[in-house]
Structure formats: structure tokens, C-alpha cells
Image (cartoon, grey):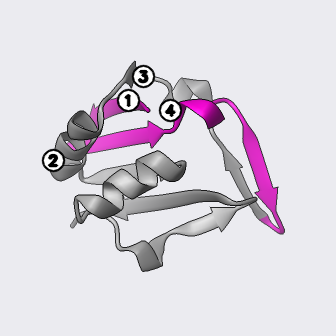
Amino acid sequence: MYMKKYETEGQVIVAICDKNIIGKKFREGELVLKLDNGFYKGSEASEREVKEALSSATIANIAGERAVACAVDCGCIDSDAVIFIEGIPHAQMIRI
């Protein structure tokens, strides 16, 4: 997985994406999921590193089977909150 962290105005934003779908665009009806390298492609990260980052994130964008499964496994995302665009799982998290 690729993971990229952003820190801005007291927020910690984490973008996580499976390696096999980075740089691709998926469309289903009016929904578009663009997995832009500039936003998602940071360092390669293990499941442990992803879970640690998610536990301290205030906002997260997560795409791909492995990345979303990791977020669900650590309790940051409820499986009912996952949407699928062209079969690709995607979830967002905001911690308030």
C-alpha cells in the first residue's frame, strides 16, 4: 500500500491506496474515484504502519481492497460505510 500524510491547521490527513490501483480512475454512474499519484502516492507502508497512522488521523481517504480491509480491521471504518466504484472499495473517515 501507499500512504501519504498531510498535516495542516491542526488536522492530520492520511491518504492510503493499494499499489495496484494507484494512478487509475474509476467511474460508476455519477461517482468518480480518481486515485491521483500526487495525492495518494507517498511511501510504501505495512498494515501495521497504516493502522498506526489511521489511529492518529483526523481525516482519511482510503481506496483499494487491502487498504480498506486494514481500516475496517483497526476499527477506523465501519464496513457499512464502504462504497464501491467499479468494484473498488473506497472509504473516508473524519474524526471530530
| Residue 82 x/y as whole percent | 50, 69
Mark found first going from the N terminus, 1 or 3: 1
- Residue 8 shows up from this direction: no
Marks 4 and 1, how far apart in space?
A: 6 Å
Give 95 or 72, whichever is nearer the viewer: 72
Mark found first going from the N terminus, 2 or 1: 1
The image's mark for residue 42 is 3
Marks 4 and 2, how far apart in space?
A: 18 Å
Residue receiving disc 2: 56
Predominant SS along the magenta part: strand
**Which amino acid, mark 4?**
Tyr
Name the residue located 38 percent from the left edge and 31 percent from the top edge.
3
Marks 3,4: beta carbons within 8 A: yes
Name the residue located 62 percent from the left edge and 38 percent from the top edge.
35
Marks 2,3: beta carbons within 8 A: no
In the image, is 50 to the left or to the right of 86? left
Marks 4,2: beta carbons within 8 A: no
Residue receiving disc 1: 4
The image's mark for residue 40 is 4
Helix, strand or loop for disc 3: loop
Marks 3 and 4, how far apart in space?
A: 6 Å
Q: Which residues are magenta?
A: 1-30
